[in-house]
Image (spheres, rainbow, N blue to C red):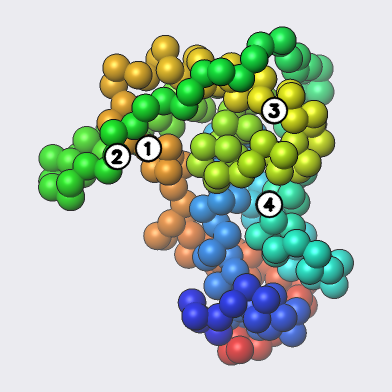
Amino acid sequence: MGPGATEAQLVAAAAERSEAAVRELIRRNNPRLFRVARGIVSNDAEAEDVIQETYLTAFTNLDSFRGGSAFSTWITRIAINNALTRLRRERPEEEYDTVNESDHTSVLPFPGQAPGTAEAQLERHQLRRLLEESVASLPPELRLVFILRETEGMAVKEIARDLELNPVTVKTRLFRARKWLKVELERRVQGGFDAIFPFDGKRCADMADRVVEGLTSAGAIGNKGV
């Protein structure tokens, strides 16, 4: 089952142990799950571990997915829970606080995509690196809400629901993250936040291979076709 299938069709096929459907669902969800996990944990390797664990959990428990929300929403919540569990296990003593600030700072002003010249591509690569380093340096509680809002385009209410936070707390953390990044980057930014923490190409294919291997060992998938 390929790129033209709907999410519901893929989930149904995955429930019937279709390897092809599992691989396609992984391909579609890898970018978001990696960004979400990377917004919580401290490095790429940990983020990959989180999303591999997330896929194994999701695909071996598809019978618990009731379809009340999109599969992508359901699996994103699993990724958030897995990443937060890992973070708490590694840093149980860490506590996060909030401040009483109003949400009046705008997002960093981006002028739009640059033309597809070699120079522009190089600049965008350099920018992505700058953005990743800057966003990664944010405190974890600020980094996650910022990525969910600016990279994934989630509404404040959705973020508050998924993280079990008060919407005011989400707005406060967004304000703090934007304020810090604005000071750090406003003179140098040339692109957008959609470029940060990519997860595609070989990394994406390798993740699918690892998940399929784990699911095959667990007997959760069998047929390679639709």
14 displayed left or right of 183: right
Mark 1 nearby-residue class (10 Å; few <14, some 14–19, many ≥20): some
Upstream in sequence: badge 2 or badge 1: 2
Task: Identify the secondary structure beneath mark 1.
Answer: loop
Q: Real-space Cα distance between discs 2 and 4?
A: 28 Å
Q: Mark 1 points at which residue?
A: 192
Q: Real-space Cα distance between discs 1 and 4?
A: 22 Å
Mark 4 nearby-residue class (10 Å; few <14, some 14–19, many ≥20): many
What residue is rendered at 66% in x and 11% in y? 101
Upstream in sequence: badge 4 or badge 3: 4
Of tags 2 and 1, the one toward the viewer is 2
Of tags 2 and 4, the one toward the viewer is 2
Q: Indicate the position of residue 36 as horizontal and vertical percent values.
A: 61, 43
Q: Name the residue under label 2.
A: 112
Q: Mark 3 points at which residue?
A: 170
Work out whether 168 lies above or below 45.
above
Work out whether 46 lies above or below 166.
below
Q: Real-space Cα distance between discs 1 and 3?
A: 21 Å
Residue 76: which disc?
Answer: 4
Mark 3 nearby-residue class (10 Å; few <14, some 14–19, many ≥20): many
Task: Identify the secondary structure beneath mark 3.
Answer: helix
Q: Quarter-wise, where is residue 161 in the image? A: top right
